[in-house]
Image: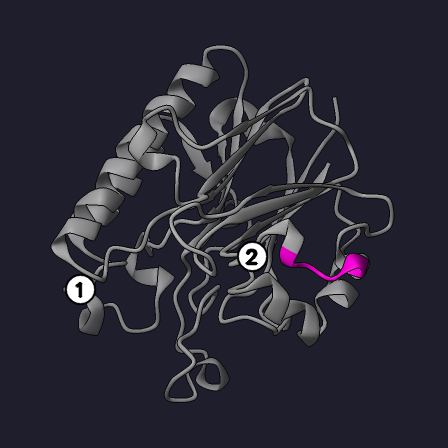
């Protein structure tokens, strides 16, 4: 199975910037999108039925044009879930869960903590609640999780770690949660294949950051370690434009 993930920073905007060309060339079995900033009824008819793929949408209920995740899939899941169990985590459109025969696939847009101390705490609470949910479902079958985690894990994962150590997205408390996540047996699949610096998935629109590759790696595919031996490849596609993030991918070997 080939899975792609992309924070598109507005679905209606990215479809005007070559999204469908990338989508068709990717030939993924599942495409997970974050920060869609749209609801299905806001889409053009041509964007609602694409190559026979099914769509799942979890838009924000807090306000229009904010947050939201979507999934396009060829292989139908056994079951679909939306959001985390706690009610306060259900209205921002941050999670879709697909259950397949051999694993659960989570598409998640984790909160950004830069706005205020309150939002930072919300982000940390969301991390905690997500790990609890993943561990609960993992008792039944392995876990795959993709999306925008909004945190660079290690100094190798951003261009200027020293200058950003006091900024949400690289705070010690946020990075510590990723350490905890990994300690529970979740594997950063990209680092299975590439240990080099300079591999990023997000660049600010300011200061010509993308042209200089002054970025952050905050988008990930993690698998629970039971699936590690089935990971064929994991990659980043920095050559793909259309958003301030780029797509990432994962290929899993079939049993």
State the scheme by which the image is colored: one colour
Residue 21 magenta-highlighted: no
Residue 66 sits above or below residue 17 on the image: above
Report the label total. 2
Viewer-proximal residue, 185 or 11?
11
In primary-sequence order, the first of circles 1 and 2 is 2
Q: Is residue 23 left or right of residue 111?
A: right
Task: Name the residue at 30% across, 42% down.
Answer: 178
Task: Name the residue at 37% across, 24% down.
Answer: 85
Q: Residue 56: where, in percent of width, then height?
A: 65, 39
Helix, strand or loop for disc 2: loop
Residue 44 magenta-highlighted: yes
Q: Residue 152: where, in percent of width, then height?
A: 33, 56
The answer to whether residue 138 is visible is: yes
Determine which residue is flagged by label 2. Answer: 38
Q: Quadrant of residue 80?
A: top right
Query: The magenta stretch spans which residues?
Result: 42-46
The answer for how far apart the CA atoms under marks 1 and 2 are is 33 Å
Determine which residue is flagged by label 1. Answer: 165
Question: Which quarter of the image is occupied by the N terminus?
Answer: top right
The answer to whether residue 176 is visible is: no
Q: Is residue 234 left or right of residue 195?
A: right
- The kind of secondary structure the magenta stretch mainly shows is helix
Task: Name the residue at 47% across, 42% down.
Answer: 108
Residue farthest to the right? Answer: 51
């Amino acid at each position: 199975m080939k899975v792609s993930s992309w924070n598109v920073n507005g679905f209606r905007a990215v479809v005007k910037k070559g999204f469908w060309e990338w989508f068709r060339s990717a030939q993924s079995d599942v495409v997970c999108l974050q920060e869609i900033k749209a609801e299905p009824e806001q889409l053009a008819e041509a964007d609602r039925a694409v190559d026979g793929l099914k769509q799942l949408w979890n838009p924000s209920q807090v306000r229009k044009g904010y947050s939201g995740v979507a999934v396009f899939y060829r292989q139908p899941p056994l079951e679909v879930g939306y959001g985390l169990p706690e009610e306060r985590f259900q209205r921002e459109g941050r999670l879709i869960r697909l259950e397949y025969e051999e694993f659960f696939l989570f598409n998640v847009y984790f909160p950004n903590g830069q706005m205020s101390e309150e939002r930072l705490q919300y982000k940390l609470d969301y991390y905690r609640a997500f790990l609890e949910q993943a561990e609960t479902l993992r008792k039944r079958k392995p876990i795959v999780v993709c999306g925008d985690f909004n945190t660079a894990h290690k100094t190798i994962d951003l261009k200027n770690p020293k200058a950003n150590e006091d900024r949400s997205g690289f705070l010690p408390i946020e990075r510590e949660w990723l350490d905890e996540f990994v300690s529970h047996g979740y594997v950063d699949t990209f680092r299975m294949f590439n240990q080099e610096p300079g591999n990023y998935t997000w660049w600010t629109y300011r200061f010509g950051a993308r042209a200089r590759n002054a970025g952050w790696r905050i988008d990930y595919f993690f698998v629970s370690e039971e699936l590690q031996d089935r990971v064929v490849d994991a990659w980043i596609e920095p050559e793909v434009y259309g958003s301030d993030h780029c797509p990432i991918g994962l290929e899993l070997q079939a049993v």
